Image (cartoon, rainbow, N blue to C red):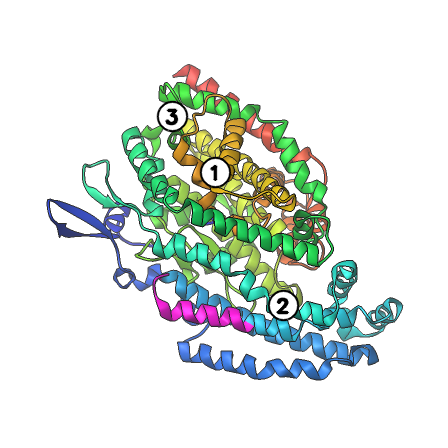
Amino acid sequence: MRGFIRILPAAAVLAGLFFSTGTIGAEVKKAVERSEIEAKYKWRLEDIYATDEAWEQDFAGVRERIPALEKYRGTLSTGAGNLLELLTLEDSMGVTLGKLYVYANMRSHENTALDKYQSMADRASSLMTEYSSASSWVVPEILTIAEDRLMGWLDQGEGLALYRHRLEDILRGKPHTLGPEQEKLLAMAGEVTSMPSTIFSMLDNADMTYPSIEDGSGELVELTKARYGTFMESGDRALRRRAFTAFYETYNKYQNTLAALLSSIVKRDIFYSKARHYNSSLEAALDGDNIPVAVYDNVVATLNDHLEPMHRYTALRKKVLGLDEVHPYDLYTPLFPEMTREYEYDEAVELVSRALEPMGPEYLEAMGEGFAGGWIDVYETRGKRSGGYSWGSYGTHPYILLNYNGTLNEVFTVAHEMGHALHSYFTRSNQPAVYGDYTIFVAEVASTANEALLMDYMLDVTDDPAGQLSLLDHHVRQIQGTVYVQSLFAEFEREIHTRAENGRPLTAESLSELIGGLYRKYFGPELVVDEIYKINWGRIPHFYNNFYVYQYATGQAAATLLAENIIEDRPGAREKYLNFLKSGSIDYSIELLRKAGVDMTGPEPIEAVARRMDSLLDKMEELIAKR
């Protein structure tokens, strides 16, 4: 995920996001405080808990119920009834734990510098660890039940039949499940092993600050992550260079700390993989979703065989922008800045809604509820978590965090995050709690399919060649970022785990040299990789969620094919897609995608994305030649 409703014009709203304060010799635009944002631009976390006191009551209630798990220990093999009661109790407590966790964390994301909600988030995390420890005996004990007996219970008992897929999946994991005491120890270690991720988040979002720089109007502004993203899309190369230098010089100051944190998280992954008897940390990470390692390797290998579109685009960028050299700060500015503009949030909502009409009335009705129903936190404020995401839990409606700044990219972010949110909405509306979520492997499909439909719509309604060029360039940059860059990150992540598994240290210098080489390989000989940019590995939060990023590439590939089926109105395409959204985790991810019409076990979907990028570049070059 990117991760990433107004009446006033976009310029007025965006101007209202900043206030000026006098300084000696200059006026600096400061980030807005959350209290200055109108309620209709904020999410309604009160829909989860009306008050913090209600959260405390649920917190205490779960803690009181945890000991109830113990009474089932040693009884699961005596009959289907006890097993069903235990699984039902787990579901009930899991739903409440999910609500406790997401509420506290989303409150903390409103302002990461506030201690109160950070403390509540820490307490929720500790409670989940306590619950995991108390229930750690459950899976090992289920595995002591004779398989034929367990299958007999599933065939005979209507209540227990609900858990068939979950129980079959537990049996699949038997070789990697430890004894009750060992499982308890691993569960108890959870809070400790998650600390590198927590520390990185606090350093990156709360403690790390960036210098003020001169913006395109000659005013001093406080650099933030959201502003950095905006500056990188500016047509002013000197501004891009100033923002780039200030941003990455800041990260370079912390390079040894960042290397230690990343090394710690890699060692965590290796620890768990060895404890559970996997051949590698990669195999361990993929096994939970029953994804073969070959699928991951296939993404990297297939894209390595199809780097020409990326090299071609870097060369085209150099030509169109009239550059002597292409630097990292030249990679994300639109090639046709004359077409860039600000989109009011209402306009973004309208564009997304029209673009997704091929999804049909059921989808559109749910989306309208999302835009109007307190799901979305729209604007950047001081201390707010950067980027964008969709979150929530079973028993809540979905939530979307944005840092909306009015660019075309942000319009696509709205479509992207609404895709995630509606995937969650349909899943939770149609599946019981045990299957009320979906795996990371399919998480990017719905979001990227929305982007594909939005792009198709905007190209269809744009008549002038300049506008078409701007959109084509945006789509190519999307493929660059979602497929190729994420494959670069996936290759980097696989390599650092392999090095650590072979006893090689992960120093700041070695990490920087590795990622610098990968950037040169993926973007081609026209890219000059600045020395300060090699710290980029130190600012990627997804590296703290091991082997996640490759799924952006698989998601883009699957979404491209699914969106094409829907746009071309192929028989049953929309119905199959909606069934996919409603399926949650009722089956394995690869099977769910196969039923929807995409086979991710081979190279074809990845090759299709590379062909699409080549086709887009053909159209761009044809239009450029006519200018």
592 to 479, vertically: above or below: below
Circles 3 and 2, Cβ within 8 Å, touching? The answer is no
Residue 162 shows up from this direction: no
Q: Is residue 19 magenta?
A: no
* Residue occupied by mark 2: 187
Q: Position of residue 259 (x, y in %)?
A: 48, 46
- Point 42% across, 44% down: residue: 255
Question: Does residue 297 appear anywhere in the picture?
Answer: yes
At horizontal 30% and vertical 57% (from top left) the residue drawn is 382
Residue carrying label 3: 466
40 on left or right of 178: left
Image x and y of residue 171, in percent: 79, 62
x 44%, y 46%: residue: 256
Quarter residue 87 falls in: bottom right
Say what secondary structure mark 1 lies in: helix
Q: Which residue is mark 1?
A: 509
From the image, give the main secondary structure of the stretch colored magenta. Answer: helix
- The secondary element bearing badge 3 is classed as helix
Q: Label 1 sits on what residue type? A: Glu
The answer to the question of whether label 1 and label 2 lie on touching residues, with beta carbons closer than 8 A, is no
Q: Give the CA distance from mark 3 to mark 1.
A: 43 Å
In front: label 1 or label 2? 1
Q: Look at label 2 and name its amino acid.
A: Ala
Picture mark count: 3
Q: Residue furthest top?
A: 625
In this orientation, which residue lies closer to the viewer: 253 or 456?
253
Is label 3 or label 2 in front? 2
Range of residues picked out in magenta: 111-127
Dot 2: what SS?
Answer: helix
Of mark 3 and mark 2, the one earlier in the sequence is 2
